[in-house]
Amino acid sequence: MARFRRREKTRAIPRIEPRVTALTILFLVVLGGAATRLYYLQIIRHHALAELADRNRIRLQRQPAMRGLVFDVRHRPLVDTQPSFDAVMVPEDASNLDETTARLQKLLGDNAQIEQKLERAEDEGRPEFDPVIVDEHLTWPQVVALETNQLDLPGVSLQVNPRRHYIYGSLAAHLLGYVGEVTVRDLNRFPNYAMGDEIGKFGLERAWEAMLRGTPGGQEVEVDSVGRRLRLLREIPERPGNSVIMTIDLDLQKVAEDAIGDRAGALVAIDPNTGYILAMVSHPAFDPNQFTGGITPAMWRALTMDPAHPLANRAIQGVYPPGSTFKIVDSIAGLEDRTLTPSTTYTCAGGIYFGGREYRCWRKQGHGAISLHRAIVESCDVFFYNVGQHLGIDRLAAWAHAFGFGRKSGIALDNERSGVVPSSAWKMQRFGERWYPAETLSASIGQGYVAVTPLQLADFAAEVANGGTLFQPQFVKEVDDIDGTPVKVFPPIVENQVQIDPDVIAVVRDGMAGVVNQADGTAHAARMDNVVVAGKTGTAQVVKEAQGQRTKEDQLPERYRDHGWFMAFAPLDHPQIAIACIIEHAGHGGSTAAPVVKAVLQKFFELNPPQGGAPARNPDANQDNSVDPLAD
């Protein structure tokens, strides 16, 4: 059997080559990575990627709502909305963004700032596939060029957006305000806005933004590979904003602006029985249409660097010494505090000496012995120096504060200034110094530290007209829905009721009527034949003259000349309108501001004939209506 035995041989175990091992591991790694990636894409990122794919094919196009219209008190449009063709780009749809941008720039012209707007959108965190408005308000030739070359402009399309239009240009610009494109700061405050939306920046547009804006809508559209619209899938209609009915009268506003002309100044006309603004003018002005769709840097620099300050609303931001118009505050305060009576007499010799210096009257030869009525009519400074001295600064300040001076009126406009009513406590707090009695003399004729706005002076004229009621000034009467249904109505708001003896008001009104209608009054330029106008002139001194010197107005450079004031109300017995007007660096109010006020009054009573109007007091058809060039 041994021969049949075979010797068993040991078989060697095959050895795996290192390359095979490496390939196997690599295969497993690749397979694992692919599986992980598929899991990530199909499971974890499924919703995000599906949304991105849809956004590449289906776009949500936001439709801004039309802003509400703005009307005057007679329902005539002042601000409306017009269609604007805008060039819109989706950078992700452009296969070669630089090439597309260059072609579009050539078509639209050098004024289009395409690259800058794309960069700005990226800096502000624009989401993918969100359109960027690269040029607004295209002309018809630009629209035709864009449509003709659509195939060569992937990612570019035309979009029709509502554009704000101020029908009368600069008319009432400071009251209406303007709109502009939202900024990052706006978006942080109002998250329901989107880039490219318009928002009120100034004036009524800003104050009534919530009412005017409306509710945006949108469209879901299918686009092709280069972003061209194929079909509409779904639409949510936008809701236009509400309409705002203002209290101003377009005809009155036009006349007031034309009467001021190219001069710098302001005018405010108020209904003394409601506090509604009938007209508000600030000159020089600006055209709000410049801001629609974004103002260029060059235009903005021109407006902000203009020494005439056209963006400033002088009606509420301009603070000026009230001059002799403040003598009506003296008169009421003195009569009410019993330091003055209608028969109180002081002698004016052309000035008085107090504290070692002379305080002059505007009339060099003086007025002689003079009582209250004639002192108001002829605006005697010496008389009111004495009135102020007997009152004292703190009592005078208390009455001025009661009439609304020295504080904001509460009108719904930004950056209103409060003016200044000095007192002993005010000076100690402001300068750390005591009040000197001589300073009361300057304050009593509306000079020194005293400073008011045209709106405050118009409010005061209205208070004298209505017997002491201070209304909050308002320039919006109601807000209407798109179908004309009132949404909100703004009734008169009484801010303060100053208790004044009717006999005191009668004395003061009688004096103010004499200012306009008596032969020796300082405001003949405002006299009317069919309506009794009551008023008071004033001069706001710009540069203090040296002691003992008198400089003629026409010998001074224009920037150093006095401002001219005039405040008035009419008719005397049943006032319907109160006005204050200032013309800067134009001299005395009787010859500069009074004719402007008369033009407004004539138009007002043409539109609103007076009921039972009486002839002017002391009419004299042959009297000389010229104004003494030094009269204030």
Image (cartoon, rainbow, N blue to C red):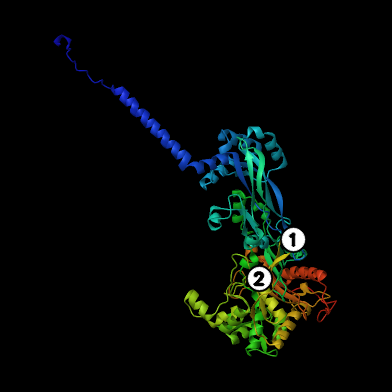
Q: Name the side, left or right, on which 427 lies relative to 600.
A: left
Task: Give the quadrant of the C terminus.
Answer: bottom right
Q: Of 356 and 71, which appears nearest the observer?
A: 71
The extreme right residue here reads 621
Residue 509 point in image, percent of width and height: 73, 82
> SS of the residue at dot 2?
helix
Task: Give the quadrant of the N terminus.
Answer: top left
The extreme top residue here reads 3
**Marks 1, 2: nearer the viewer:** 1
Q: Is residue 451 above or below residue 305?
A: below
Q: Name the side, left or right, on which 365 lies relative to 100.
A: right
Residue 243 point in image, percent of width and height: 71, 61
Residue 481 point in image, percent of width and height: 71, 62
Q: Of 38 and 293, which appears nearest the observer?
A: 38
Residue 212 point in image, percent of width and height: 66, 59
Q: Which residue is mark 1?
A: 483
Viewer can see residue 299: yes
At label 1, counting other C-alpha atoms closer than 10 Å, the crowd grade (few under 14, some 14-19, many 20 or more) is few
Q: Which circle's residue, 1 or 2, is located before the other in the chain?
A: 2
Q: Three-letter amino acid code at disc 2? A: Leu
Q: Which label number is shown at residue 455?
A: 2
The quarter of the displayed image where residue 460 is located: bottom right
Q: Three-letter amino acid code at disc 1? A: Asp
The quarter of the displayed image where residue 373 is located: bottom right
